[in-house]
Image (cartoon, helix red, strand yellow):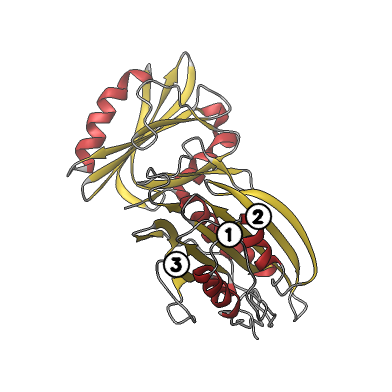
Amino acid sequence: MTSRFDVGAGRGTCGSAPRSVGGPRGARLAFLALFLAACAGKEKDEPPPPPQHFPNVELRRPGFRLLHPENWTIDAGVQGYDPDRFFFLDGPDGATVAFMLLDEAAEPPQLAATMVRDHGLVEAHETPFTTWGRYEGTGVDVHGKNEAGVPAGMRIFAWSGPQRSFLVAESYVDYAYAGARAGFEAIELSFALTGTEERWPDVALGTPVEDTDERLLVRSGFELRFPDTWKVDAGAPGYDADRFFTLVTPYASSWMVVQMLEGELDAGAVLEEARAGLAPILEVTRSEEPFDRWGRFAGHGVELKGDVGGLAATLRVFAHAAPGRALLVTEFYYDELKDELEPGFRGVAASFQLRG
C-alpha cells in the first residue's frame, strides 16, 4: 500500500490494517483505515524555489475553522474525502496537513500511536510534545528519511474532548520545509473546533515562531510578526487585542501603535485626524515627507522628523482604508536607534495581513 504520508520525495508506507484505538470503534476505525490508506507520494527531484509569501484565507465548516495560505489547497480527490471529518491540505513541494475529526471521544495516546507506527520513515527518531495550537494532547515529532533517502519529518498530534476528538499529521521533506513553514504555522495557530472555544486564538501577546527570532500574532482581523525582543503592551490604556495595541521595542521610548477602525473611511481623512492628535509628540518639527505605502498596503502616510527632549526623533503615521474598516499605524523612534530598530519596524510592515 502506498502512503500519502511518504512526506514528499519517494514513497513510503502508512500501514495496511486499521487498529483499535479505544472507545467506540465503528466510525473511528473506518476513518483510520482511510487515514492510513489515503496516502499517495509526490515525487520531487528539484529543490524548491525560495519561499514566497501568500496571504491566508479562511476555511470555515460547521465544526471548525482555520486559516491557510492561498497556495495551499484541499485535495477533494483523496479516498474518503469528507470536508467536515477527513481531508488533506496540500502545500508546496509535497507538504501536507491531514485532519481526521471524530464525533466521539478517543484516547489521544492510542490515536497518535496508530499514526506513529505507520509514518513510513526509516532511521527515524521521535520527540514527544503536548501542545498543538491551542490544544493540549499527545504529540510525536518524527524525523528520519523516506524510502528515497531524503531527510523528512512528520508531526502527529491527537486530542480528545468528552464528545469529539481529532488527529492531525503534518508532513514535509527537509529541503522544502522553509517554503511550507508559514502554512504549518497558520494552520496550527488558527485551528479551532467550534463549541469548545468560540473566540479566535488567544495569542494576543504573540506566539514564538520556532527557529526564528520572531513572534506571530494572529487575530480574527489580521496577523503580523514582530521581533521576539519586542512585546505587546497589554497593560496600556485602551488596550484591545483586536483593535488597539502597542508594540514596544527593547527601548520603551520607541514603539509602534496599531489601530483598526470600523466603517467606510477615507484614508486621507484618517491620517489627518491622527496627525492632529499626535502633533504634541514632537516638540520641534524640522521636516515632513509624505509616503504612500506601508508593507503591502497603499494609502496615505507622513514621516515627521523633529526633536523630543532635545534628541532627534522620527514619527511615522500611515492610514489604509479597506471595505468596512481602516488600518492606522503609528511608529516612533529616536534617530540614534534607527539602525537597530528599523529592521523590526519594516518586518512588522512586511508581514502584516488583513483577515476576513
Q: Residues within 10 Å of mark 3 (few under 14, many from 20)?
A: some
Quadrant in the rendering for residue 198: top left
Residue position marked by numbered label 1 in the rendering: 181
Q: Earlier in the sequence, mark 2 or mark 3?
A: 3
Disc tally is 3
Front residue (pair 49, 61): 61
Kind of residue sitting beneath label 3: Arg
Residue position marked by numbered label 2 in the rendering: 139
- Dot 1: what SS? helix
Q: Is residue 90 visible?
A: no
Residue at left offset 35%, top offset 46%: 221
Front residue (pair 147, 319): 147
Give residue 80's position: percent from left, percent from top.
Answer: 47, 79
- Distance between mark 1 and mark 3 Cα atoms: 24 Å
Residue position marked by numbered label 3 in the rendering: 85
- Distance between mark 2 and mark 3 Cα atoms: 20 Å
- Distance between mark 1 and mark 2 Cα atoms: 18 Å
- Dot 2: what SS? strand
Give residue 319's position: percent from left, percent from top.
Answer: 29, 41
Q: In which quadrant of the rendered image does the N terminus lie?
A: bottom right
Q: Earlier in the sequence, mark 1 or mark 2?
A: 2
Horizontal relation, residue 11 to residue 77: left or right: right
Q: Residues within 10 Å of mark 1 (few under 14, many from 20)?
A: some
Give residue 165's position: percent from left, percent from top.
Answer: 51, 57
Q: Residues within 10 Å of mark 2 (few under 14, many from 20)?
A: many
Quadrant in the rendering for residue 167: bottom right
Q: Earlier in the sequence, mark 1 or mark 3?
A: 3
Kind of residue sitting beneath label 2: Gly
Quadrant in the rendering for residue 227: top right
Residue at left offset 60%, top offset 82%: 42
Kind of residue sitting beneath label 1: Arg
- The answer to whether the residues at label 1 and label 2 have Cβ atoms under 8 Å apart is no
